[in-house]
Amino acid sequence: MSLDSSARAGEPPRLGRTPSTSQAELSHIALQLFVEHGFDETTIDEIAARAGIGRRTFFRYFPSKNDLPWGEFELLLDRMRAYLQSLPASLPLAEALRQAVIEFNRFPPEEVPYHRQRMALLLNVPTLVAHSTLRYASWRQVVAEFAASRLGVPENGLQPQAIAWAYLAVSLSAYEQWLKHDDADLAELLDSAIRMLGTTFDPRTAL
């Protein structure tokens, strides 16, 4: 997902996936091998060979095999943080987070097959489920930082952390539904799931 350089002046930049890079292509190759042979059965050497690179070059792009399904996740987190910061302060917290989460998960049609493979692996392969906790923590941190800045409280406080956990939970629930139905629209599922939170985190009604 990348920032849309064609965004109109005065509007927040949009998130969307960047054109393929060496890192993105390597992730796609790995996903194909994981589907063909299984995640645990596929080796780094096999991935490197399919990509036409050496083992040492592989590690320039990814620190481990477990990181391959995540693609350019860290870059996307940076763009999500920038997107949130670009939103007007007058926009309610819940609405700002809703827009950011949907944009973070927006991608072009040609990426759909890869993304389905990616999420099916991340949500079901035990090795990756355990590894994912680190990535989810990074994602929650971006949300908590933004929520804390809006609420004027420490980012490690209960309210920002609860908000971050809640948005992660509803996002994952939307992904589970998306993977169950080939014709489902991810953006619509995310929108519906997030809207169910309603005004739960409205500071005027918080405990």
Image (spheres, rainbow, N blue to C red):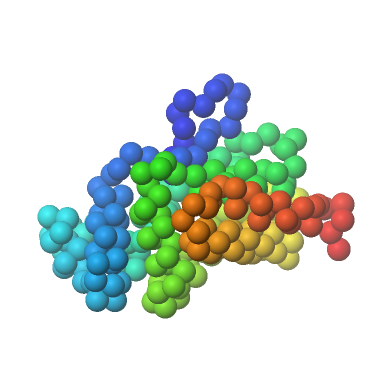
The answer to whether residue 154 of the structure is visible from this angle is no
Q: Is residue 57 left or right of residue 120?
A: left
Name the residue at 53% across, 64% down: 176
Closest to the observer, 184 or 83? 184
Residue 173 relative to residue 17: left or right: right
The image quadrant that residue 167 belongs to is: bottom right
Residue 47 placement, left or right of 200: left
Residue at 52% across / 35% down in the picture? Answer: 14
Decide: is 74 above or below 86: below
Percent of width and height locating residue 186: 53, 51
- Could you say where residue 112 lies in the image, as x and y percent from the top left? 40, 50
Residue 200's x, y, as percent? 79, 57
Residue at the farthest top position = 9
Q: Nearer the viewer, residue 123 or 104?
A: 123
Q: Residue at x 45, y 28 (%)?
A: 5
- Residue 96, compared with residue 166, is above or below; it is above
Is the C terminus in the top left, top right, bottom left or bottom right quadrant? bottom right
Q: Position of residue 134 (x, y in %)?
A: 47, 68
Q: How many marks?
A: 0
Left or right: 47 as drawn, with respect to 188: left
For the N terminus, the quadrant is top left
Q: Inspect this view and state whether residue 203 appears.
A: yes
- What residue lies at 40% left-to-right and 54% top-to-bottom? 115
